[in-house]
Every structure is written in C-alpha cells, then in structure tokens.
Amino acid sequence: MATVSPAAAAATVAAGERGATSIADRVVAKIAARAAREALRRESPQARTQAHATVTVHRRDDRRHFGEARVRIAVELGYPSDIGAQCRVVRRHVTEQVKALASMEVPEVAVEVERLHSPLQERAGRGRVR
C-alpha cells in the first residue's frame, strides 16, 4: 500500500475544489462588538460604554473572499457628548477591524444608540447617605 503525502494529494485536486474556509456569523459579531467598544473607549476613556452586535453575512460565489458582512451595532453612550462623532468613529473602526481580522467587506454598519448615560443619573443611582 503506497502512501501519498498531503502535498502530493493537494496537487492532484484543483484549488477551487479543495474546500473553503468560512467564518461564522457569531465570530464576526464578536469582532464587531469588540471593535465598537475599542473605538468608544479610545474616544472617551473615562466613560462607561457598552456595545452589542448583530451581523448578517452575505457570501460571494468566488472563493477568494469570505463575503460581505452587514453589521448592526447597539451602543450605550455617555451624555452629553457628540453622538454623531462617536457613531462615525464606531462605524470606521468596525469596518477596519472586520476587514483586517475576518477578510470580509463591510458595506454597511448601522449604529443604534440604545441608551444614554448622564453623570447625574449615575450619581442619583448610588442613593443618598444620611
């Protein structure tokens, strides 16, 4: 019985028929959520920020690309702040990170502001001491 090395076996199968690597939607969602948190922390390091992501992945037929990801991010921001600027920073950083880490194009990042935190609310939440 002759054994065939993996390199020789791979050479006999055409490149397009060897299989494909796919990246799960939940992995892309984790990358996007982490990127959103990083962007918000960089923008305002002292603020309490949260980010959650849901992702819809569209696959392409050609095997060179891992597809497109349309990302929806829900964030909690400090207030008062420049909400539009923070959303732009999140969109840009999420796009860059998903492209760099998952090799996916990101044609759309929708940022939803889920909650605003004001310093007055945080102090009021601690309660009064008598």
Image: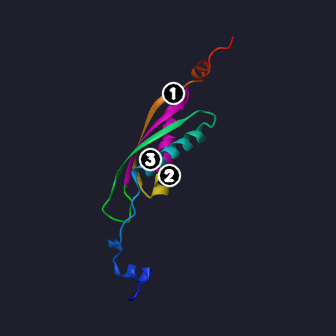
Depicted 115 relative to depicted 109: above or below: above
Binning the other alpha carbons within 10 Å of mark 1 as few (below 14), some (14 to 19) or many (20 upward) gives: some
Total numbered labels: 3
Q: Secondary structure at mark 1?
A: strand
Q: Name the quarter where the C terminus is drawn.
A: top right
Which residue has dot 2 on it?
97
Mark in the foreground, 2 or 3:
3
Q: Which residues are magenta?
A: 68-97
Q: Position of residue 123 (x, y in %)?
A: 62, 20
* Three-letter code for the amino acid on which mark 2 is drawn: Gln
The kind of residue tagged 1 is Leu
In magenta segment, residue 38: no
Name of the residue lying farthest toward the front: 1
Q: Which residue is mark 1?
A: 116
Name the spot of residue 75 as percent of width and height, x first: 48, 35
Coordinates of residue 46 in the picture (x, y in percent)? 64, 34
